[in-house]
Amino acid sequence: MASSGPFPAFTLSPLALGLLLLPSFVHADSDTVLETVTVSSEQPLADPRLPEVTTATRTRTPARYVPQAIDAVAVKNLDAYGQTDLSQALTGVPGVDASGDTRFDSVSIRGFSAANDLYLDGFRDDMQYSRDLGNIERVEVLKGPAAVLYGRGSSGGIVNRVSKKPQPGLPSSVSARVGSEGLWRLQADLNGSLSDDITVRLNAAQEESDSFRGDALHSRRQLFAPSLNWRLTPALNWLVQYEYGLYDRTPDRGIPGINGRPADVALDTVYGNAARDYIRDETQSLRSRLSYDLNEHWQLRHLLGVIRLDSDFDNTYQTGVSGNRVTRQRWIQDLNALNITSNFEAEGQFTTGPLAHQLLAGIEIGKQKRDPKLYQNASPVPSLSITDPDTRLQYNGAMKINSDNQHRVDTRALYLQDQLSLGLWKLLAGLRYDRFDIDSSNQLNGKSESRSSHSLSPRIGLVWTPLRDHSFYASYSKTFAPAGGGTIGITPGVTSNALDPEYTRQYETGVKSDWLDGKLSSTLSLYSLELYNRRTTDPNDPSRVELTGLQRTRGMELTLTGRLVGDWYARGGLALQNPEVVRAEANRQGKRPANVSRHNGSLFVGFAPENGWYAETGVTAVGQRYADTANSVLLPGYGRWDARAGYRTRSWDVEAAVTNLTDHRYYASATSAAQIQPGAPRAFLLSSNYRF
């Protein structure tokens, strides 16, 4: 059940409440020296590169030495256009397609859904909710299987949000923005030091907005995220972070498809009950990183992540089309979910003869629970006209319970990774063993079932640097997906629960290059990604499921980021991919996965001196996609043109931005053939930021 106050009490609340007091003690102290952080929010506008990443190896590794494609997106480049949630933010990243709606974040990477492959600072965050980016520094998208370090899932890749952390000498800031559809947002990012050994940071935000889909669709966000970095001794450091988020909104399931295309209806046509429908997500997280330097070459650390979601909704939405009428259902849900992850890691550097090693060894222990309770309309919900829906026709009758389940997961894992260097060659080799135990119970009929599975997940990659500015690489990686490992839960008594996990493998090669004396960076990658034992219904026995299916994506990606000449810069990329369900049920074979385009990408070019006038403009392009797995409704491709300009001084930024400059009508994503999300029309945003 959701808490009634903005700062709810739960088992971790003493720490959270203690951190509430930190801002009153903050004072600037630029001489304090704590743990080095690679990327700060004050990175110059004209240099959008992020040369070091952490997601791919769980160590600080230059991106050019990672034998796998990874895109790092600075959130400051997204804030300018008002993209404060994850699904919007990743549109335009090569190989990534949006697939969510107003209920929760969801994307596809290289043709495979990554809805359950979302992480926060390396901790699994696979719950169904919409994430705010106010406390996020950058988003790293690792392409391809990542089970060697993160466990199950990740067929197409993972999305890891890297949060803002306390940094000595970093200025504080306050910002305000107003925009179209009644949008306003206030945010504070306060940094300082309590002593020579303690640095603190607080991010807080409040946002409200209506929707281009109608003024009755309203949303409200709150964010409160304090953090502390404490150098307890010269060798012992503790980073602790708490985050609270609240997101109240009117759900919007979009419009239906008709005759193979999105319905030709007015942009503000809705089919729900805006006066009553709501979604309320309340999230809390606590992350702790305790690191101990044994010496200059070895470090021990303990990582703890606790993420909790309390979500409930009441939603009337369209489920299909019958003639010229839209059929609907009403559902009420109460959901509680909790993830706890604990990692013990050792990282060290040593040599064996001519070989230099960077070794990472870890143990992961995890627990998850998910308790969904669903109610459905007890009698039919009135249907509505597709083109002229009378939303006064609503269902106010009895609701019947549909399901009441409890799901519990225990995971145990061991992983080992070695990064070896010998002259012009670098080898990355890793192996992980996972044990996955799930227990699900149906509270309505008393049935329950437990299942266990285990798997080995390897990765090996080779990097060759025969030229100073160019690194050639090749890699192989593999991942697994056990029954119940996606949305967390199995249906007791279903025979397919006993099947082995699904497996995905990827072969990738490419070249990572620096240009213009290192000012500009690019990555060109070629890959083949296969889910080679996909679950498939036996055509001769529909009650039987076999591991005989095959889904494959082959593609090419190119990214380019950095400075061009003087104060001019560019950022963007392009993906060409061929996703296909190769072997499956008759109605799926040869089809393309839903919400996956054959090409997508973006290109932004800007001019940004250290101070003075600056500007940026760019295009985000997404090819045709299908709204459903049957490929019955086609979403047309689109190109969206955005632009911004502003003036920057040492202390102030004032900026104006326009998204969808040409007011082009397009469709952002779909969750079914009956639920297609229109993209936003032309929108304006005015923001100001003061640093001190």
Image (cartoon, rainbow, N blue to C red):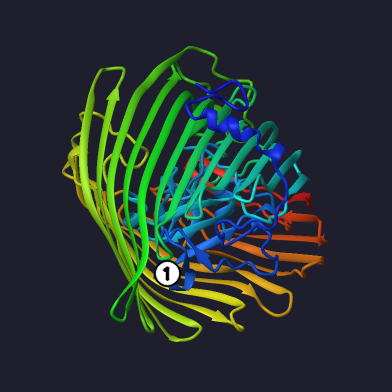
Q: Where is residue 44 in the image (x, y as percent from the top left)?
A: 69, 66
Residue 132: name its quadrant: top right
**Viewer-proximal residue, 465 or 190?**
190
Look at the numbered disc 1 and give the secondary structure of its residue.
loop
Q: Percent from the top left, x then y, of residue 444?
A: 31, 17
**At x 55% / y 57%, what residue is drawn?**
35
Q: Nearer the viewer, residue 243 or 396?
A: 243
Identified by mark 1, the residue type is Val
Q: In this view, does 442 lie above or below 145?
A: above
Label 1: which residue? 66
Q: In this view, does 390 lie to the left or right of 626?
A: right
Outermost residue to the left: 540
315 vs 267, left or right, is left
Q: Residue at x 70, y 65 (%)?
A: 45
Q: Where is residue 101 in the image (x, y as percent from the top left)?
A: 54, 41
- Which residue is painted at 55% across and 36% down in the image? 253
Residue ranking furthest to the front = 233
Residue extending farthest to the top is 398
